[in-house]
Image: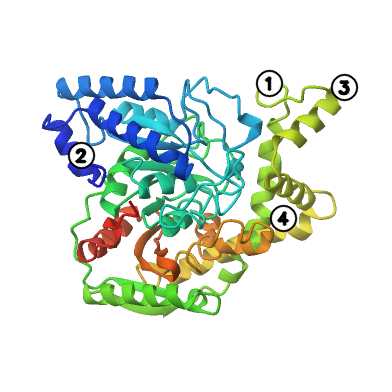
Amino acid sequence: MFNASLKQLSIQLAGKKISSTELTSEFLKRIKQLNPEYNAFITVNEELSLAQARAADQMIAAGQAGPLTGIPIAQKDIFCAKGWLTTCGSKMLSNFISPYDAGVIERFNQAGAVNIGKTNMDEFAMGSSNETSYYGPVKNPWDHAAVPGGSSGGAACAVAARLACAATGTDTGGSIRQPAALCGISGIKPTYGLVSRYGMIAFASSLDQGGPMAKSAEDLALLLNVMVGFDPRDSTSLQREAEDYARDLQKPLAGLRIGLPKEYFAAGMSNDVASAIEKALDEYRKLGAQTVEISLPNAPLAIPVYYVLAPAEASSNLSRFDGVRYGHRAESYSDLADMYRKSRAQGFGPEVKRRILIGTYVLSHGYYDAYYIKAQKLRRLIAQDFADAYQQCDIIMGPTTPTVAFNLGEKSGDPIQMYLSDIYTSAANLTGMPAMSIPVGFGDKNRPIGLHIIGNYFKEAQMLNVAHQYQLATDWHNQSPV
């Protein structure tokens, strides 16, 4: 049951071999037993989850079920869910019960899925290791001494440890793909604008994008079919015809051109990661694909550009958390300005404060042109590099992360080293292109390694096909730490 795919579970539910109430109850028992060990969930609400499960059973009995009806899915604690504590991993929102559902939550509710709980995350999605959470770090299920990645580390851990069938995440600079790689699961960041950001607590609005995390590419396709759709409440939401992301899964890869950026295979990648990626590429060649060397000359600038733009947007977005309307408020203060200062000083953690200060600085008079405007120009050049590369190839591949998961506490004292964990992933957010990570082996200390797949705009179905064909030929995605 815990290792079954979403498709297998859907068939069992439709055939009345198991009910959603039974399935949900088993996962809730597993969470109760194992979550103290992993710290993957911030909030579990058995009453709300079982109520959804009973409603799903009624949908199935009435013949109104879809592929995800009755299936327990974990939701990253950045998505507002009505009646659920929604904290964003921060003391600032540690008492916030959402009065409404995010667009993504609405779509899962309409599909009849069950919210099994809200997963732990880096505070306000700012981090690469899930160590900045007010609720404590998440443990990597493969090695408890290691980080699970961030910011969607709780979601990745929950899927890898089989505490949930699948999970939602958000990706601002790699926060779905990096933890997916470090926990040995699959995760995809869709094209910017495909998944509604309504009710998804904002970090950097031009970069944030929701997406699914699961064991396999086939599971991701089923999840995307539910998550993607136009939302008029989100000004960045794209209005496109609905598509079936599972339609091309069985397509052969003969003739596929895989671009290998020379900048991604340079110094900085560890030997164990390089070896696993090369073996994965060899498997793709056996499947009929060909590899071509390409160049993304401005790729090395992605990290500095990202860490100018993302904090700038964060400093604006997080100004709403002032202790006035909702969230943490200081117990004692002398006047309104003092309340603002104390509430924000007490409510935000060190990493969030660091990024607010950086963002305020680069947007300030005298530095706006020197930093923010220049970063936006470089962002355009990075996007042009990818556009030029797709004249030579159909898909781009490389490592998701430069190393396997590092140890808890290893980089928390060095923000620059922590930021470099996203060196291969942040460009997809700057350009808005879709990208995903799939497991391709194990490296040092038997810690997972991920292959990064980047597609052109709206090529999610092609990327999922490329990933699925590899997973039909290999078994890495079925490996479990428990």
Of callouts 1 and 3, which one flags the residue occurring earlier in the amino acid sequence?
A: 1
Q: Is residue 435 visible?
A: no
Tell me how far mark 2 sits from mark 3, CA to CA.
57 Å
In this view, 312 is above or below 284: above
Instruction: Name which residue type carries label 2.
Output: Leu
Q: Which residue is mark 1?
A: 325
Tell me how far mark 4 sits from mark 2, CA to CA.
48 Å
Q: Which residue is mark 4?
A: 372
**Helix or strand or loop: what does disc 4 sit on?**
helix
Of callouts 1 and 4, which one flags the residue occurring earlier in the amino acid sequence?
A: 1
- Residue 289 versus residue 54: which sits nearer the camera? 54
Of callouts 4 and 2, which one flags the residue occurring earlier in the amino acid sequence?
A: 2
- Asked if marks 1 and 2 touch (Cβ < 8 Å), the reply is no
Classed neighbour count for the residue bearing mark 4: other residues with Cα under 10 Å, few (<14), some (14–19), many (≥20): many
Of callouts 1 and 2, which one flags the residue occurring earlier in the amino acid sequence?
A: 2
- Asked if marks 4 and 3 touch (Cβ < 8 Å), the reply is no
Q: Nearer the viewer, mark 4 or mark 2?
A: 2
Q: Where in the figure is residue 149, as x and y percent of width and height?
A: 51, 54
Of callouts 2 and 3, which one flags the residue occurring earlier in the amino acid sequence?
A: 2
- Looking at the image, residue 309 sits to the left or right of residue 441; the answer is right
**Helix or strand or loop: what does disc 3 sit on?**
loop
- Residue 70 versus residue 257: which sits nearer the camera? 70
In this view, 282 is above or below 397: below
Q: Nearer the viewer, mark 1 or mark 4?
A: 1
- Asked if marks 1 and 4 touch (Cβ < 8 Å), the reply is no
Instruction: Name which residue type carries label 3.
Output: Asp
Q: Which residue is mark 2?
A: 9
Q: Which residue is mark 3?
A: 335
Name the residue: 57% across, 47% down: 206
Q: Where in the figure is residue 57, as x and y percent of width and height?
A: 21, 23
Q: Where in the figure is residue 162, as x and y percent of width and height?
A: 33, 45
